[in-house]
C-alpha cells in the first residue's frame, strides 16, 4: 500500500529534480566557459607581453609571426605589424630619410591650456615640402579650435583637417596639405603651434607624431619619434579554436615603449 | 487485524520518510539553485566589467546626469588604427523586490564621431547593488546579488591595461 505512494512521490520528485540539476549544471557550465575565456585572455596577454619585450629590445625578427606553446595549456599565435593607418589616416614607412628632417617638441601649461610647439628643422640642401602632420595624444585633452599658428599648414594657421578620437580616449590631430605644399627652406626651421585644453599633469602630453614630407630630389620623407605597431595575440586550444584574442597598439622601439590601445577581440 | 495495523504503520513511516526526503531534496535543490543563480549573476556582471575595464582609457563610476539613463559605470576605449571609439555603459533597470537588472550598452563611433553601432544586452539580474571604487592603481567592483533566501557579495579587482 505504501509502495505505490512512495513510488509516486519519487516520480513526482524526479520531475523537479532532473530539470533542477540540469539548471544548476547549465549555470556551472556557463561559469566554466567564462573561466576558460578569462584564462584565454590572460594567455593572450602573455603573448602581448612577449611581443612588447621583442619590440622594446629591437629583436631582429620581431616582425615575423610566431607561436608560443603550452601557456596555460594553450598556444599563442603572435603577429606584430607596422601600422599603415592611424585613425584612418595613412602612415608610411616611418624612418624613411629621417636624417633630412628633425622634430623637436615643446609643451608648456598655463590655466587649463597646453601650449604645444613642434619645430621641424631641415637638414637638406633643398626645400622640404610638408605633406601632413599627425600627432597622437593621450586621453584627457581636446584641441582648441582656431589655435593653430603655423606656416607649414595650408592655408597658414589652418585648424587640423581631422580631429579624430575623443578627449576621453585620446585625440589624434591631422593636418593634410594640398599641393603646392608649404615648405621648410634648406637648413631652416619652421614652427607649428597649437593649443590643447585639459587638466594639468597629463603624462606623455607630448604624444607621438608622424610627419610626411618630400623633397624633389630624394622623394618622400617619413619622420616619427618612434614607430607605431599593432600586436595581435590569439590564444588557441589544441584543436586550433581561438579561445581569446587581444589586439594592442603601441609606439615603440629603441628601448622606448608606450601602449596606446588594448582591445579584447571581438 | 494486528498485522494489517503494523503494515499500515510501517508503510506510513516509510511514506513519511520518503516524503520528508523528497521535500528536503527539493528544498536543497532550491537553495542550490538560488546559490548558483546568485554566483552566476554576480559573475556575469563581474566578467563583463573585468573584460571592458582591461581595455579602458577611462572609467567613470556613477550616474552621468547628462544622459537620461541610470548608468553606474561608463568605460571608454579606442581602436587607434581605425580611430573608432567605444563608449560602454552599465545601466540599472528595476527588477523585483528591490533587486535590479543590469544591461550593457555599447556605442561605437567612427573617427568623425558618427555612431556606427549601438548595441544593448542584458547581462545580469537579481543584483542588489554594485559599487565601483578605485584602490591604488586598481578598480574594485563589489557586486551584491540575491535570489530567494540566498545572497552573496562578490569582489572583482581589475587593473587597467593602459596606464
Image (cartoon, rainbow, N blue to C red):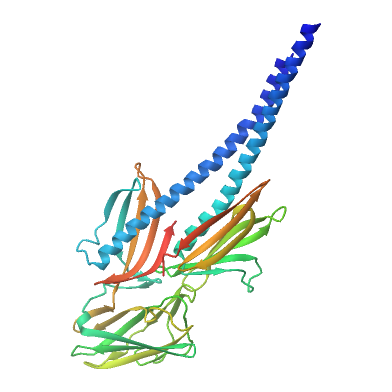
Residue at (34%, 59%) from the top-left corner?
Answer: A232
Give the position of the C terminus of chain A as an image quadrant: bottom left
| Quarter-of-image position of residue A156 | bottom left
Q: Is residue B101 above or below residue A260?
A: above
Question: Closer to the camera, B38 or A61?
Answer: B38
Q: Is residue A225 above or below residue B123?
A: below
Q: Is residue A199 visible?
A: yes
Percent position (x, y) of residue B36?
58, 44
Residue at (62%, 34%) from the top-left corner?
Answer: A19
Percent position (x, y) of residue A52?
30, 64
Asked if residue B119 lies left or right of residue A103, the reply is right
| Quarter-of-image position of residue A104 | bottom left
Residue at (36%, 45%) from the top-left corner?
Answer: A237
Residue at (27%, 92%) from the top-left corner?
Answer: A189
**How many discs mark residues in the rendered view?**
0
Give the position of the N terminus of chain A as an image quadrant: top right
Q: Is residue B19 above or below residue A99?
A: above
Percent position (x, y) of residue B95?
69, 54
Percent position (x, y) of residue B11?
73, 16
Asked if residue A180 lies left or right of residue B89, the reply is left
Asked if residue A37 lies left or right of residue B71, the reply is left
Q: Is residue B86 visible?
A: no
Amino acid at each position: 500500500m505504501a509502495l505505490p505512494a512512495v513510488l509516486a512521490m519519487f516520480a513526482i520528485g524526479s520531475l523537479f529534480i532532473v530539470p533542477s540539476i540540469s539548471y544548476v549544471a547549465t549555470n556551472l557550465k556557463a561559469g566554466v566557459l567564462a573561466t576558460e575565456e578569462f584564462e584565454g585572455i590572460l594567455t593572450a596577454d602573455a603573448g602581448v607581453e612577449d611581443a612588447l619585450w621583442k619590440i622594446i629590445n629591437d629583436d631582429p625578427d620581431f616582425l615575423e609571426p610566431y607561436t608560443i606553446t603550452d601557456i596555460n595549456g594553450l598556444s599563442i599565435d603572435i603577429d606584430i605589424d607596422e601600422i599603415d593607418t592611424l585613425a584612418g589616416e595613412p602612415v608610411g614607412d616611418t624612418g624613411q630619410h629621417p636624417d633630412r628632417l628633425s622634430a623637436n617638441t615643446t609643451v608648456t601649461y598655463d590655466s587649463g591650456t597646453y601650449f604645444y610647439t613642434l619645430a621641424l628643422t631641415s637638414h637638406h640642401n633643398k626645400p622640404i615640402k610638408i605633406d601632413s602632420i599627425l600627432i597622437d595624444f593621450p586621453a584627457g585633452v581636446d584641441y582648441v579650435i582656431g589655435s593653430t599658428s603655423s606656416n607649414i599648414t595650408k592655408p597658414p594657421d589652418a585648424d587640423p583637417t581631422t580631429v579624430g578620437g575623443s578627449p576621453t580616449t585620446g585625440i589624434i590631430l591631422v593636418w593634410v596639405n594640398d599641393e603646392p605644399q608649404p615648405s621648410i627652406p634648406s637648413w631652416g626651421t619652421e614652427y607649428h603651434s597649437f593649443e590643447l585644453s585639459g587638466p594639468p599633469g597629463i603624462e606623455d602630453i607630448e604624444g607621438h607624431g608622424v610627419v610626411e614630407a618630400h623633397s624633389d630630389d630624394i622623394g618622400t620623407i617619413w619622420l616619427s619619434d618612434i614607430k607605431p605597431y599593432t600586436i595581435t595575440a590569439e590564444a588557441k586550444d589544441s584543436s586550433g579554436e581561438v579561445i581569446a584574442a587581444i589586439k594592442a597598439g603601441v609606439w615603440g622601439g629603441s628601448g622606448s615603449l608606450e601602449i596606446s590601445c588594448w582591445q579584447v577581440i571581438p | 487485524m494486528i498485522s494489517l495495523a503494523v503494515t499500515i504503520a510501517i508503510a506510513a513511516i516509510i511514506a513519511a520518510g520518503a516524503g520528508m526526503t523528497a521535500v528536503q531534496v527539493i528544498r536543497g535543490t532550491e537553495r542550490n539553485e538560488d546559490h548558483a543563480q546568485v554566483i552566476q549573476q554576480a559573475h556575469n556582471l563581474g566578467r563583463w566589467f573585468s573584460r571592458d575595464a582591461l581595455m579602458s582609457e577611462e572609467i567613470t563610476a556613477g550616474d552621468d546626469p547628462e544622459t537620461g539613463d541610470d548608468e553606474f559605470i561608463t568605460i571608454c576605449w579606442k581602436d587607434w588604427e581605425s580611430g573608432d571609439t567605444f563608449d560602454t555603459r552599465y545601466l540599472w533597470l528595476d527588477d523585483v523586490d528591490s533587486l535590479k537588472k543590469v544591461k550593457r550598452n555599447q556605442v561605437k563611433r567612427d573617427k568623425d564621431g558618427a555612431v556606427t553601432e549601438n548595441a544593448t544586452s542584458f547581462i545580469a539580474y537579481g543584483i542588489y547593488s554594485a559599487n565601483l571604487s578605485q584602490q591604488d592603481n586598481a578598480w574594485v567592483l563589489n557586486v551584491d546579488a540575491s535570489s530567494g533566501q540566498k545572497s552573496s557579495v562578490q569582489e572583482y579587482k581589475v587593473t587597467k591595461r593602459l596606464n
